[in-house]
Amino acid sequence: MGAAKTEEFTKRQNSIATLAKALAHPARVAILEYLLKTDNCICGDIVNELPLAQPTVSQHLKEMKTAGLIQGSVEGTAICYCINKDTLQKLQAYFSQLSVKLEAKNQKCC
Amino acid sequence: MGAAKTEEFTKRQNSIATLAKALAHPARVAILEYLLKTDNCICGDIVNELPLAQPTVSQHLKEMKTAGLIQGSVEGTAICYCINKDTLQKLQAYFSQLSVKLEAKNQKCC
DNA sequence: AATCTTTATCGTAATATTGCGATATAATAA
DNA sequence: TTATTATATCGCAATATTACGATAAAGATT
């Protein structure tokens, strides 16, 4: 077929995969980094920052929002997007944990 | 159109996106976790562990290998796959750095 | 109310991913 | 050399993603 067999894996594995997918495009990495460095989290600024059309950026923002990586709040006519601290923390914790476990491990081959 | 505009972003952003994409499927998260916990990094064991056909697993392994997340070494008839420490470390460092920066930041809205 | 500004959604084309049966390849074993 | 075993690749169908013009929706401004 072609549909991802997500239901065959654990909730946690799917959760990590979903978060990873939310960053699996350079535009979305760029959005995260922009939100981190700027004090202006207005959607229009993100659109101006990126080399993509407004609907495309809007779509990327929606995916990141659905994944829980960012959140938006209405600010008059504009929308202010910010990074979701808890989610980023979750990702950070996951990779730190993997790294620690890997350090403690003695990989046989390679 | 439909092709990702990767050339419009920085090398680093593409690099992170590529690594994220390598984990943007629960099967690939499962593979990483299996490789972390087991002492048997034989390909056939991974195939048995996952609810996917052998060619599908082989394809996922190839993508993870291309992204540099794992590496394989020939072990007789079998192939032994291991996690690439440096790459995992890179991911860990990236998210830790983001997390630290975010903690230090005062997000205006949301 | 009419208009302007900002963002979201629709529709659709191009491309990429996912999954797997069939088959090829490579190393070992008989 | 002929199996056997383990993994990779091919080919294709189903599905998902990416991109964007056109347009809708929601709020501000006049």
Image (tube, coloured by chain):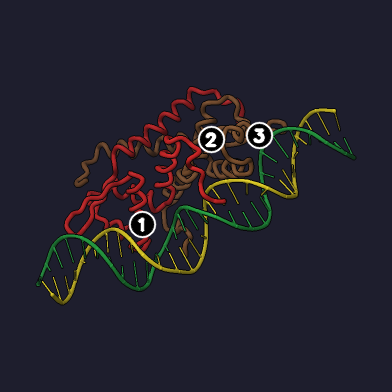
Chain colours: A red, B brown, C yellow, D green
Measured from the top left, where is residue B58 in percent x and y?
61, 42
Which quadrant, please, contains the C terminus of chain A?
Answer: top right
Measured from the top left, where is residue B83 in percent x and y?
54, 33
Residue displayed at 42% across by 33% down: A95
Kind of residue sitting beneath label 2: Ile
For the residues marked 2 and 1, what is the alpha-carbon distance in whole angstroms?
A: 30 Å
In the depicted view, which residue is nearer to us: B107 or D24?
Answer: D24
Disc sitting over residue A40 in the figure:
none
Label 2 marks which chain's residue? B
Report whether mark 2 lies on the same chain as mark 1.
no
For the residues marked 2 and 3, what is the alpha-carbon distance in whole angstroms?
A: 14 Å
Q: Report which residue position mark 2 lands on.
A: B31
In the depicted view, which residue is nearer to us: B48 or A70?
Answer: B48
On the picture, is B36 further left or further right than B77? left
Residue at disc 2, secondary structure: helix
Q: Are marks 2 and 1 in contact (CB under 8 Å)?
A: no
How packed mark 1 is, by other alpha carbons closer than 10 Å (few <14, some 14-19, many 20 or more), is few
Label 3 marks which chain's residue? B
Kind of residue sitting beneath label 1: Gln
Q: Are marks 2 and 3 in contact (CB under 8 Å)?
A: no
Q: Report which residue position mark 3 lands on.
A: B79
Residue displayed at 44% across by 39% down: A14
Kind of residue sitting beneath label 3: Ile
Which of marks 3 and 2 precedes in the sequence? 2
Residue displayed at 40% across by 42% down: A19
Residue at disc 1, secondary structure: helix
Q: Are marks 3 and 1 in contact (CB under 8 Å)?
A: no
Position of A41 relative to C3 (above/below):
above
Closer to the camera: disc 2 or disc 3?
2
Disc sitting over residue A59 in the figure:
1
Report whether mark 2 lies on the same chain as mark 3.
yes
